Image (cartoon, grey):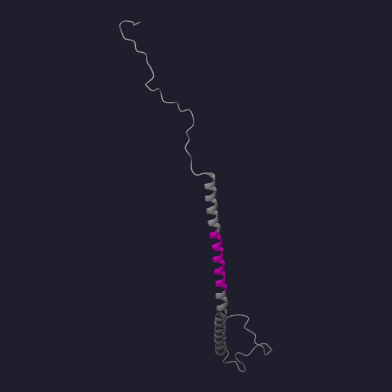
Amino acid sequence: MSSGGVPYSQDLPPAGGYEPIRYKRNLPARGPGGIAIFGAVFGICAYGFYRVAAGVHEKKELEREKAWSRIHLVPMLMAEGDRDAYRREAAALAREKEIMKDVPGWEAGKSVYSTKRYTPASFVVL
């Protein structure tokens, strides 16, 4: 049965057939698994806590060193304060002698208190 002398050719599948249709989802693995993520988070947290503990230890050590340095510096600072107080008292005595040199019966440096105990000056003249 040909119509008009044109050879009729039916469209057929290729030899060997069509390739199978992929109808299943083909999702690749997306990153590490849950155990790996949990392990990484645990490791990072453990390292952070280690660094915090090391920082606390370092801070305590610095505070201890600071306290001991102050303990060892106290005698020197007290001696410097005593030297400064003596220098100021000597200067005040010299000023008093200079100012009151014309006043008869004035004893420079005599205590105004009626006691033999040492009483430091209650004000400082700069």
Identify which residue, 91 or 107, lies in the foreground: 91
Residue at image position (57%, 73%) is 67
Q: Main secondary structure of the magenta part?
A: helix
Q: Residue furthest front?
A: 16
Among all residues in the image, which is located at the extreme left?
5
- Where the N terminus falls, by quadrant? top left
- Asked which quadrant contains residue 49, the reply is bottom right
Residue at image x 52%, y 47%?
36
Image height check: is 58 above or below 107?
above
Q: Which quarter of the figure is the C terminus placed in?
A: bottom right
**Residue 124: image location, x then y, percent:** 59, 80
Q: Position of residue 96 (x, y in %)?
A: 57, 88
Vertical placement of residue 48 versus 7, above or below: below
Q: Residue furthest bottom?
A: 105
What segment carries the magenta color? Answer: 50-67
- Residue 63 part of the magenta segment: yes
Question: Whole-percent x and y of residue 64?
Answer: 57, 71
Which picture quadrant has residue 7? top left
Residue at 58% from the left image edge and 77% from the top image edge: 71
Q: Is residue 106 left or right of residue 18?
A: right
* Residue 78 percent coordinates (x, y): 57, 81
Q: Looking at the image, which is closer to me, 116 or 16?
A: 16
